[in-house]
Amino acid sequence: MVRLITHNLLACHVKGCNSNNFPLEFKDVQIELREAEFNPDFLKGFMPKLEWKALVDAARQLGDTSLPLELPEMLDDDFLKNLHHVLLEIHVEEGTMTCPNCKHEYPILNGIPNMLLAEHEIG
Amino acid sequence: MALKYLIVFAQVHHEFRIPELRSIAELHGFTFSLPPSPEDQDPTRPYMVLDLDEEEHALILARRCILIKSVYEFYGQGSTYEELHASNRKNQARWARYVTDTSFRFIVTAYNHKIPQARQSEVVESFSYMGFLGKIDMKNPEILLGCFEEYTDRSGITRSKHEGDGQFRQVYFGRLLEEGSARALVGKFNVKKRVYYGNTSMESEISLLMANQTLACPGKLIYDPFMGTGSTAYPTMHFGAFMFGSDIDGRQMRGKEKVPGVIRAAKQYGTASRMMDICTFDVTRNPWRCGGLFDAIVTDPPYGVRAGAKRLGRKKELSEAQLALYMEYRNKPRSDDQPYFPPTKPYELSSLAVDLVLLARYLLKPNGRLVFFLPTVTEEYEEVDIHLMLCEGMEVIANSLQDFGSWGRRLVTIRKNTDREYPPPSFDQELQAPSTHIPAHKDFREKYFQGFKKEGEDVPVLE
Ligand SMILES: C[S@@+](CC[C@H](N)C(=O)[O-])C[C@H]1O[C@@H](n2cnc3c(N)ncnc32)[C@H](O)[C@@H]1O
Ligand SMILES: [Zn+2]
């Protein structure tokens, strides 16, 4: 935790920060790898929701280059295994996620990201 | 042709029984029929005969429904033993295969009554026309035959022990097909045996019933936006689903040790890898990038008695000290295990409920379900309460009351019945024109602490 599937779903939500607010940039991260159950149907079902480029970039930043830059047409087993590993098995335990637009920093502590905003950041 | 099965229910949460049967049938892609007469569909009665297409379906129900004590292959029923035996004879085709060489045992029992030993033997004798040739085996019989007499509730009426014996409402007979094995999960998920829990944790039986309402199974992603100590998550993950949790108060999910409490509890149940992630945020200020993500949302919203609803915003001015802390926070955001939080203001339950349905419509996939508790003052409750919080694309499919006397809570299941995409809610219910009907859950917290006192009535105030 934070897994990359989660990272792919979270955008900066500071008041007025509506563009270029995704993906959040990882900084000073500590990573752990943990095995998860492989479920190809889950992966295929989730793919339409993913921002592919953001996922590939985040994976590369964390040292995993197994995913192709372009989403392949054929979802073979090798590809799904790599996707499984990237989405579900890489956990960011410590560090921060920074908004590329407003630079708000969301800290991650013991695997839990704090996405809570301060008063001046809400509507 | 439909086959009949006798369901023996556990004697709890009767309003949850049929919704649970329906959910598990839907999850496994089959249907069943309730008995034809409304009287026999009454969910407060302990026995019910269902029509199913296959024996396999009866097994599935017995293995997944928390409220099923056991399932019998149905042989007969009646309001007298004459009727019962007549109906049992008609079903001879179902039991004839056990006549020649099957060891068996009989049990004769009653609901709301105790049958004297002598009459129990009489009842067993009365089945002798079935001509079972196998030996009677009290310890390890190949089949167990059950005869169940249902009496109406006579509690509060003084009577001698066996008075009214034989004056049952209905008697049922069948062969045990399967003991309900999901009930054991109530013990497995017992909160007191959990390595991490708090005063908002929910009893395991209820959280299991909620998990069944979500249709949890492998490959699904389910979300609790008011995660707390994670009670809704453990059963859901046990049934194979991935779980995502968030809460405005990170300490509720963390507890005091380095490894967060909800993760430790998930490990205890062997499901930590299905805890997708946990996040700290105010659900009314949420960071979800898009909607259509979840198969279900399952939650016990904060209704103010134990864990008040809050949202970011200011209720009153800050003190000097708070202001200093606030400035510090502003300059340097920090993690959520620190003692300071941004200011919050109370969040009225009826607006929260409306917001929750709108949020669910945004975040759920088509056909996804929202399963949540709604506390309500029983006497004032009207059906309209729930329909008031609905919006286009969301329909109530189950609504079961857990009755605590002067108050209760309803487990509501709502389905998103459209594949249209909706925008995220604006969370400004409080600003919108109030509707003329005031739902019974409005200002629930205030009513609770007044002991649900009605005007002019003098009721001691709860501490
Ligand atoms: C009734 S408790 C849920 C209990 C949970 N089922 C458990 O097992 O502990 C409600 C939770 O909602 C949280 N909460 C209150 N207002 C919130 C908000 N605006 N956004 C997110 N969480 C909130 C509280 O911190 C509390 O943990
Ligand atoms: Zn931002």
Image (spheres, rainbow, N blue to C red):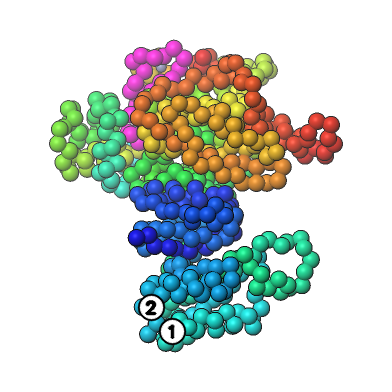
Q: Amino acid at mark 2?
A: Ala
Q: Amino acid at mark 1?
A: Phe
- Point 25% across, 44% down: residue: A40
Is A35 situated above or below B387?
below
Q: Secondary structure at mark 2?
A: helix
Q: Secondary structure at mark 1?
A: loop
List the residue tagged with mark 1. Answer: B132
Q: Which mark is residue B96?
A: 2
Residue B268 image offset from top left, x and y in percent: 46, 53
Is B252 situated above or below A23?
below
Q: Which mark is residue B64?
A: none
Mark 2, other Cα within 10 Å: few <14 / some 14–19 / many ≥20: few
Residue B215 image offset from top left, x and y in percent: 41, 46
Q: Are marks 2 and 1 in contact (CB under 8 Å)?
A: no
Chain part drawn in magenta: A1-26
- Point 18% across, 27% down: residue: A69
Distance (Cα) linking label 2 and label 1: 9 Å
Q: Earlier in the sequence, mark 2 or mark 1?
A: 2
- Point 73% across, 72% down: residue: B163
